Image (tube, coloured by chain):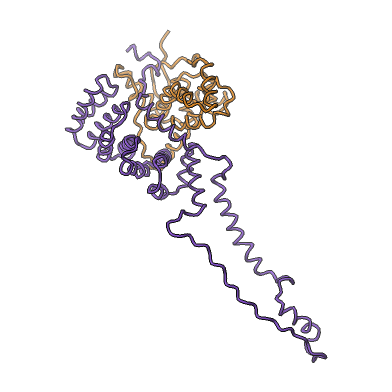
Chain colours: A orange, B purple
Amino acid sequence: MPRAKLSLVRAAPGPVTAPPPETDRILVAGVLADDPRCKKALYLKHVTYIAGMCARLLRSVDASEDVTQDAFVLAFSKIASLRDPEAFRGWLASIAVNLVRRRLMRQRLLRFLGLDRDLDDAPLDDLAREDLSVEARSELAALDFVLRQLPAHQRVAWMLRHVEGEPLEAVAEASGCSLATAKRWIAAADGRIVPHEEPS
Amino acid sequence: MSEVRLPVKTMLRDTTTSASVVRMWGRIEARGRMRPRSTMRPSWYLIPALALVASLAIAFVWPVARQRPPSPSRVPPQTTALAPAALAAPQAPPTSPVHIPAVEPRPRVEPAPLPLRPRGAPSPSVSAEALETWRELAARGQNDRAYAMLGPLGIAAEVGSASVDDLFALADVARLSGHPGDAVPPLQHIVSDHRTDARAPLAALTLGRVQLRSLGLPADAAAALDAAIALGLPIGLGEDADALLVEAYARAHEPARARAVYEHYVQAFPSGSKRGELERWVTAR
């Protein structure tokens, strides 16, 4: 298995740019009261984050749309079980990540059996901004190559932490595992990805 | 090389377009309308479980019941009358004439005719329950189970009589369970038989995308995308349709048409996010 030598700087896992909590609380209450406007507002507020995250995790824009739809449908059907409406974004992300993990595992099995017909239309280098240099694109391609070789759970955990910049607690929650397990998965992925941090 | 030092996420563009946001919301709404009407309906696994119990009962209990000697209450009246004499002295001549009551022959009872279902009547309730169950599963996002419930030929069988909502749901079940080929008949049915429905352009667009991206049929995809544009797509979806059409024509080895659609795209969406990508399709291929 190749080890990538990358000079990409990881996303600083800092505070998540969460929307004002009272807004989500009000919108969730509206959805519980069967107000379609609140449902749409909640969707519009979070769809970009969820769809973008899914596209990066799945390496496919088409597949990310499917997963995003499923995540919202599931979230709206189970919203009564959400204990803390302020945590809607994290809860929705954990639903989406769970669907992504299942899809990645199924893809891997189908690929192993030679039955996978889905196209990965969005590897990281294809998602690159248009103004990036060739060097940066090639590093993204190398990172994508290494990430593709990782088991689904390690890849998802590493990307949530270092690409999406989620805190470890959120990674563990979204991955459906303990904090220690999330750290172990990220460390295992780190073993394959050796970034060259910017010299201080 | 300064951008190389940027965090990975800042190097990536946003893939979510306004068109995709509108498209996804339309599908979420359509699936939301199919919320199960009652939560008290039997779960999907009850039907095979009950069938298994019934099979076991028939296989094991019924043969045992048949071999068991008949209980006294079940002995026919004729046997009851003869038995005491035969048991008391089977060899000795009878001391007194045995009274054998005359047994009236039982009137033959004609079996009641089975209720016949007239031709064209709706199918039995079992299939109605199965239909309800795949809808429930699809509404909950369990598309793999919904597809398993419908069976390999189930989607094609449902297409003829399904409503537009159901056709969209059937296509979603097929696509999202990893069977994009089975999504084609319901989407084609919407385009051909429900052309006046406001969602027909959306069905044609979805059909084009499935044929292009999942099935590798660029020529068919181009036809479907042409139909989507002709049917009148909402403004938010025009950019997506044009972009897919350029790719479809380019991959179908029709560079002149790809170029024509690309030029239309550039005119209609001068600052379109897919311009660079489409230029590669019309120049490099």
Q: Residue at x 45, y 21 (%)?
A: A45
Q: Residue at x 58, y 42 (%)?
A: B40
Nearer to me, B50 or B34: B34
Quarter holding the N terminus of chain B is top left
- Asked where in the image residue B234 lies, by quadrant, the reply is top left
Rendering coords of residue B53 (x, y %): 60, 55
Is A149 drawn above or below residue B11 in the view shown? below
Nearer to me, A72 or B102: B102
Q: Point out the residue furthest to the left here.
A: B256
Q: Is residue B71 left or right of residue A115?
A: right
Nearer to me, A58 or A78: A78
- Asked where in the image residue A60 lies, by quadrant, the reply is top left
Rendering coords of residue A62 (x, y %): 37, 32
Is B21 drawn above or below residue B166 in the view shown? above
Is B232 drawn above or below residue B120 in the view shown? above
Rendering coords of residue A108 (x, y %): 43, 37
- Asked where in the image residue B22 lies, by quadrant, the reply is top left
Whether residue A118 appears in this view of the structure is yes
Is B63 drawn above or below residue B199 in the view shown? below
Nearer to me, B239 or B147: B239
Q: Residue at x 42, y 14 (%)?
A: A197
Quarter holding the C terminus of chain B is top left
Rendering coords of residue B74 (x, y %): 71, 71
Whether residue A190 appears in this view of the structure is no
